[in-house]
Image: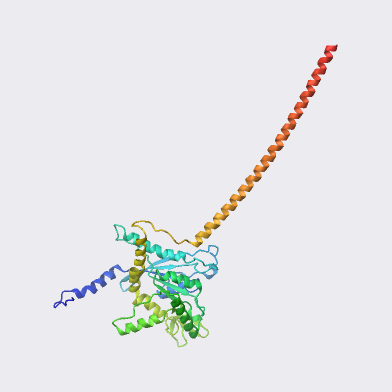
Amino acid sequence: MPVTSTGDIGIAHLPNQLHKIVSSKGANLTLMVCGESGLGKTTFINTLFTTTMKEPKNPRHRHAKQLAKTVEIEITKAAIEERMFKVNLSIVDTPGFGDYLNSHNSWVPIIEFIDDQHESYMRQEQQPERTNKIDMRVHVCLYFIRPTGTHLKPLDIEVMKRLATRVNLIPVIAKADTLTPNDLAKFKQRVRNMIDHHRISVYQCPIESEDEDTTAVNKSIVSAMPYSIIGSTEDVRTPDGRMVKGRAYSWGVAEVENDSHCDYKKLRHLLIRSHLSDLIETTETVHYENYRTHEMSSRKFGEAKVTKAENTQNREKEDKLRRDFTEQVKKEENRFRAWESQLVTERDRLNKDLELRHAQIKSLENELDGLYYKVNNGSIKR
């Protein structure tokens, strides 16, 4: 039964105390960007945080690692401070994903990375000393979709299915300025239909709020999914003389922060300004707890994790090394067999030559004995 205090005992100051604690500790945010190369992931990150978080890659070097055929994990860390509040930011990029004709199991390194961060955090929680825990759990994953204007690729569907059960997944349509407004609206609806059809659980921010304006903003943010974005760090001048972030074309300017051009402002509002704490809390209370519950119910306390997934790229390397080794062994065996055959042939030749020499020596001995016999008989007759 709730009881209302008749006097001022100080309970109402608890939010202020919590604010001071959070402000002094700061927060950890790990943001993953996933998608094919050339979709503007690096540009979007630099645009989002208004600074050069990651250096753009030189397009001339895009074929430098084609022979590797591996999905890499690149982590960029930075500390961002605004109004005395500090955020330890980690950007996780996945170069190499979706860049090859055979992309089967190319999502394995990404899934393993997310699971490994949950595993690492769970291990640290089981230690006697837990004051300096390292938290690299992925709080949100932005999945960049190529603006084809038609439908999602099978790879997109397969990867998002696996990501949605492990992390707060937010689908993003990259380079929205390459589609007309009408084509973009149709494409967004097709993506929504495919996500619903395949039952992909994307992140849904809380909508209801005590403030009606906040509720209206949340509804507009949810309705805009998947979010169409335009990334640009350059300032361009619009026909009416304004300087804005965007891309200049012969027909006009595509503005980054114009709601009629793309959903960048809504996505930024979702990620940073309104639902950052919810992303962190959902990671803790939903995704991490699901992983922790599953792992602790399937193995004993302190038991090592059983690796079920297998990195296809590493397996291909192992198979190639195994084939090369087998071929090299066969070549060496054939070489040794040929050498052995030559040795046997040479041995037979030498044996025959030796037998011939023995026969010649025997013949010479017989001739010598005959000569001795003749000589002895002649001396006797005389």
Tell me: 4 left or right of 249.
Answer: left
Could you tell me which residue is drawn at 71 percent across and 37 percent down?
349
In the rendered image, the residue lying farthest to the right is: 382
Q: Is residue 232 visible?
A: no
Hey, which quadrant is residue 244 in on the image? bottom left
Q: Is residue 379 above or below residue 263?
A: above
Q: Is residue 373 visible?
A: yes
Labels in figure, total: 0
Query: Residue 195 placed where, x, y %?
Result: 44, 76
Quadrant the C terminus occupies:
top right
Tell me: 369 left or right of 250.
Answer: right
Q: Nearer the viewer, residue 301 or 44?
A: 301
Query: Residue 288 placed where, x, y %?
Result: 35, 66
Query: Residue 31 placed where, x, y %?
Result: 40, 70
Q: Is residue 38 above or below residue 183?
A: above
Q: Nearer the viewer, residue 135 or 152?
A: 152
Hey, which quadrant is residue 235 in on the image? bottom left
Could you tell me which residue is drawn at 22 percent across and 73 percent down?
14
Tell me: 105 left or right of 127.
Answer: right
Could you tell me which residue is drawn at 34 percent across and 71 percent down?
282
Query: Residue 30 placed where, x, y %?
Result: 38, 68
Could you tell me which residue is drawn at 35 percent across and 83 percent down?
217
